[in-house]
Amino acid sequence: MIIKIIVTVLLVIAALLVYLIFVPIAFGFKGDFDEKSFKAYVHDPLRFINLRYDTSAEEKFSLKIFYFFKIGGKKKEENKPEKEKKQRKKKKKKPGDGKKKLLDFIKKRLKVILQSVFGILKKCRIHLDDCNISFSTGEPDTTAFIYGGLSALPFMYGKSNRVDADLMSDDAFIKGHLGVRGHVEVIVVIVYVLKILFTKG
């Protein structure tokens, strides 16, 4: 009896994993980079997993799993002395080895990462609701590479869409607003992430 229950539970878990990996996952993002106001969501068709993020809401981050389990909520209000202490600690902290390793990893594989991102975007069924953005990475070659990759994406050519790249700026920035929604299979993301991880720097 116990073995049957264990096998049933494992089969249900396996079925859910297959469902989440191969079913199209809906996502959306709406943001104003000047006002620093952002909204985003990710969920599967049956909403077994429902992730929300909204900078204007009281609960900025919320994650619902199978309708019942909820992660995220209101942050406890802190006293001014406690806030000041935390801010001082953050200022004192220096970038650790973990951050340095991550930055080195990204720099070594920057082109592969960007190619993978563009590959995922091509596989996504994306629709831009409104896009008016100007950006720069601070490096002309990287900025031009990103701009060229974006120009190759079909969904960038809507009437209300505009993307400008500043090749002369020495500072990294992004300005304007963006609204996007679409669907993507998790298996596609997994394949491209593995490609990044197993590419030699």
Image: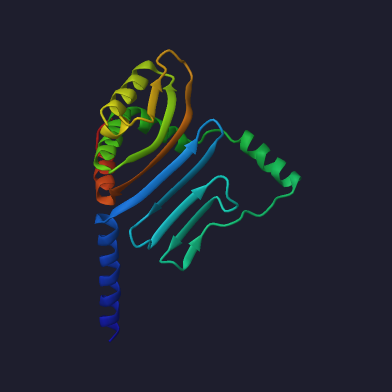
Side (left or right) of 199 relative to 102:
left
Give me the residue at 57% from left, 50% from top: 57
Side (left or right) of 40 relative to 85:
left
Q: Which image quarter is the N terminus in?
A: bottom left
In the rendering, at what x and y percent does residue 44 appear?
34, 57
Give me the residue at 47% from left, 57% from top: 63
Farthest-out residue, front: 159
Side (left or right) of 61 relative to 6:
right
In the rendering, at what x and y percent does residue 136 appear?
43, 22
In the rendering, at what x and y percent does residue 96 appear?
50, 36
Q: Which image quarter is the C terminus in?
A: top left
> How was this image coloured?
rainbow
In the rendering, at what x and y percent does residue 22 appear?
24, 55
- Up-down relation of residue 158 to residue 80 (above or below): above
Give me the residue at 34% from left, 62% from top: 46
Farthest-out residue, bottom: 1
Give me the residue at 70% from left, 50% from top: 78
Farthest-out residue, top: 168
Task: Give residue 141's quadrant in the image.
Answer: top left
Q: How many marks?
A: 0
- Up-down relation of residue 12 to residue 39 (above or below): below
